[in-house]
Image (tube, rainbow, N blue to C red):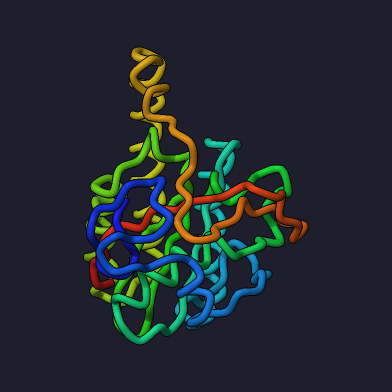
Amino acid sequence: MKCPRCVQRIHRAAACCPHCGFALAEADMRFGGDDVRLSSLADTAGLLPRRDRQRVERAMERFNRKFPQLFIAVYTGALGEVGQLRQFGFWLLNRAAFDDVPVEKPNAAGILLVIDAESKAAGFTFGYLLDPFLEEGDTFDCLTRAHPHWLEGNHADGIVKAISQLAHVLRKRCRQAKRDRERFERKVLPPTKLGDMVHRIRSGHRPPGETEPSRSNEEVPP
């Protein structure tokens, strides 16, 4: 995975980034250490009119039906700078309690798209259960395909395109896993211990000793 602050590659089991010392506790100091309750589509920047919001919600529902063990979330806001977006996405996927996501789905099975209306950047963060099936290059490709729509101000079109491409990638990975189960099983490692990340349960309880990592790819400007 890449450190959300310095973007250097670090081992998933690292207690903190060996290059810059980043840990979740630092993000807690910046964004808050309490659980955040929100819906899986949180358009706090107001980028989506009602009709567009409904289109995005339908795309999210289709994704969740195709991959019932996973869930996707979208957040829009104003974070100020690209570096903030990487850290914010990492923090939010660890601290969020999504009201409309079944409690049996941990955030480790989540994929979060964050769009920063202020810095005009976007990025994906995904939980460690996706590690065998997703790479940063995959999610970057999703953002690249959405980029032309975002340049024209069509935020909903870009989000729907990114979700559609993400589903395409995961279907491909599932077919590959069926053909070569052992190779994908070898990719499943104990979750990272970056700082004090917790295995989120939407009730707000934290099972002692459990941790939840998330990975964040580089951003492209919407």
Image point (28%, 49%), residue name: 136
Against 59, is 19 above or below?
A: below
Quarter of image, res 113: bottom left
Which sits in the foreground, 12 or 88? 12
> In the rendered picture of this protein, how many numbered marks are placed on residues?
0
Tell which of 149 and 112 is nearer to you: 112
- Is residue 132 toward the left or the right of residue 44 in the image? left
If the image is split into quadrants, where does the C terminus sit?
Answer: bottom left
Residue at 38% of width from left, 34% of height from top? 133
Q: Residue at x 33, y 61 (%)?
A: 17
Answer above or below: position of 148 versus 64.
below
Question: Which residue corresponds to the image point at 58% horizontal and 79% vertical from the top-left?
Answer: 32
Please identify the quarter of the rendering in which residue 96 is found.
bottom right
Q: Quadrant of residue 41?
A: bottom right
Please tell me which residue lies in front, 19 or 165.
19
User: Residue 137 appears at what percent x and percent y?
Assistant: 23, 47
Q: Position of residue 210 (x, y in %)?
A: 62, 47
Question: Left or right of 40: which side holds 208?
Answer: right
Q: Is residue 61 left or right of residue 128?
A: right
Please give left or right for residue 103 compared with residue 107 in the image. right
Q: Position of residue 84 (x, y in %)?
A: 36, 77
How far from the left and from the top, in percent, is residue 200?
Answer: 64, 54
Taking 96 as reference, is 13 above or below it? above
Up/down of 189 relative to 127, above or below: above
